[in-house]
Amino acid sequence: MKPKKRGQKLAKRWAVFTERAKADSREHIQENLIDRLPNARRVRLLILEWILLIVVIISLALTQAFWYTQSYSVQAFVDGGTYIEATLGQVKSLNPLFASTNSEKVLSRLMFSTLSTVDYSGHVGLGLAASIVPDSTGKVWTVTIKDDLKWSDGQPITLDDVLFTVNLIKDPTINTIYDSNFAGVSIERVEDTLVFALPSSYADFDSTLNVPILPEHILGETPSGQLMEHNFSTNPVTSGAFSFNAMQSVSSDGERIIYLAANPYYYKSKPMLGSFAIHTYPSLDQIVQAVASSEVTATAELSASYRDQFPTELIYEKQTAIASGVFAFLNVTSGLLNNVTVRQAIRQGINIDEIRSVLDYEFPLDYPILESEIELKTYPELPAYNLDAAKQKIAAAGLAGQTLRLATIDTGYFPALAEQFQTQLTELGFSVKVDIYTPSQEFLLNVVQARNYDILLYEVELGADPDPFPYYHSSQASSSGLNLSNYANSLVDDLILGARTSMNPDTRTAKYENFLTRWVDDVPAIGIYQASMVYYFNKNVRTFSEDDRLVYPVDRFGDVEYWAVDRATKNRTP
């Protein structure tokens, strides 16, 4: 048979088969579905039960799948994202040796590493240094640095960089913020170490090595007088967790945004954050608005009194004590307060609990040495409040009605504290003139350095280690020193020097206890409270741990390599 005819027969058979199948299908649908539809009413309850059963089974299956997914997955912070922090003050230079405003200090901490650093416990630990070892006298300190350290441009960080930086700090023509750390100190490189020779023993010299290191390969040929004008001040090579990326001017009044990128050569580890931005503002009101509107991620510039201005569902708050204290410094060289009996009467007639009533969650501070700095066995007893006895002493000294000049700054609790002191000093019989200044360079020059006050309400840094030398040794009672009371006592001088030069812990403890006894008796200052840092931040980010003990506010960046803003779903590790 020819293939053509065979194909025609097959096509006819397929057509007949198709027609028959269509007819059978129509008949089957008619017989088993359409003709039986009237019966559905009699079994509708059974149909509904089956539908519900199917829905339940599907729901259980979906729930089980979701539960199993949750059991082996978790929302975790991941690398990437940008953290934006609001700071107060202008940025005039990115060179860390000249950092003076809060904005510049924050940038210095983020971009530059230091030889020693404050660890999470609030004590001095190692930064770039691998070891910091004193000899038995405490006059010679030997320093080595870690291996394989690098600048953000990939060049190695060496002992020559450290030697260059210290000599730069010691240069009297530069006037950096760290020059007092190395007064009279000589430094010499001996093979793979640096040897610091001190003019006298100093048990806490390692804390003075908390200074940023500069790159010699960038600045080594720059004359000291041209350091501020060098390109490094606007585009630095860094050694910290972040490297400089760009700077944007936002307004003519100093508002800027400085963009930083994660430094892959950071000696701890590359940060999880992809970038960090510092947004500088000229006023606190602008910072409040930026935090409330989520323009920035966080700020450490605001006190606890601002908390009601932020939505609690979006902004969290951490309040952490720092190693700073607020005191009322009594100028012992002023005509009214040069008599120790008068100063004792003021201390006796001041209700310190009433003074502290204006505070929020601050920590009372009675002495110029913190318990976190050193554990003393005994503390001297403070005089009990006795207004009548104090008034009698002041009247007997012939000072009733005399005018006391009280100075402070217009920020935080200071105005309210000044009002409290004014009220109580008036009750003691004084006439009180209160001057409240805007924090500025003019205030430092014309009031603080000039000692243009009888009483100064002010905050001072106490440090990681106890050392009252800057505030109560007679050598610091000058315009260039920080002895804000102009206090001079030869026995106290000996105790302070003996404590800071002794390498024996028991001897140091005994001398500091004796110092506190003299301090309470002579009343060069009245302790008010230990300062704290309030940190407002977006609740969806990870910042420093609340368990960290901070010495300075910038110490919050001690673990910045673990900060994060981005999250992703990850499977749990078995």
Image (cartoon, grey):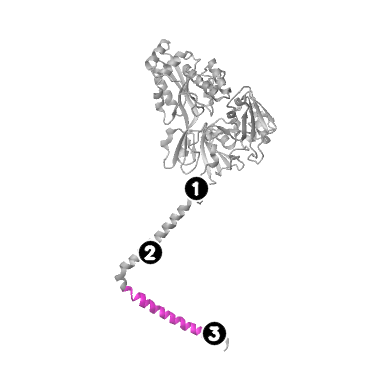
CA gap, disc 2 to disc 3? 50 Å
Q: Say what amino acid the circle numbered 3 marks.
A: Gly
Q: Position of residue 237 (x, y in %)?
A: 63, 38
CA gap, disc 3 to disc 1? 69 Å
Mark 1 Cα shell of 10 Å, populated few (<14), some (14-19), many (≥20): few
Q: Tell me which secondary structure the magenta stretch mostly adopts.
A: helix
Q: Secondary structure at mark 3?
A: helix
Q: Nearer the viewer, mark 2 or mark 3?
A: 2
Marks 1 and 2: CB-CB under 8 Å? no
Residue 441 placement, left or right of 414: right
Which residue occupies the extreme left position in the image? Answer: 42
Marking on residue 437:
none
Which tag, 1 or 2, sits closer to the chain's start?
Answer: 2
Quarter of the figure that contains the N terminus: bottom right
User: Residue visible at 49% across and 85% down?
Assistant: 12
Q: Residue 256, can we see it?
A: no
Marks 3 and 1: CB-CB under 8 Å? no
Residue for badge 2:
54
> Is residue 61 or residue 319 the one in the foreground?
61
Mark 3 Cα shell of 10 Å, populated few (<14), some (14-19), many (≥20): few
Image: 24 above or below 125: below
Q: Position of residue 337 (x, y in %)?
A: 47, 15
Q: Examine the structure image and report whether residue 150 is included in the region drawn in magenta.
A: no
Which tag, 2 or 3, sits closer to the chain's start?
Answer: 3
- Range of the magenta residues? 9-38
Q: Position of residue 184 (x, y in %)?
A: 64, 23
Image: 255 above or below 174: below
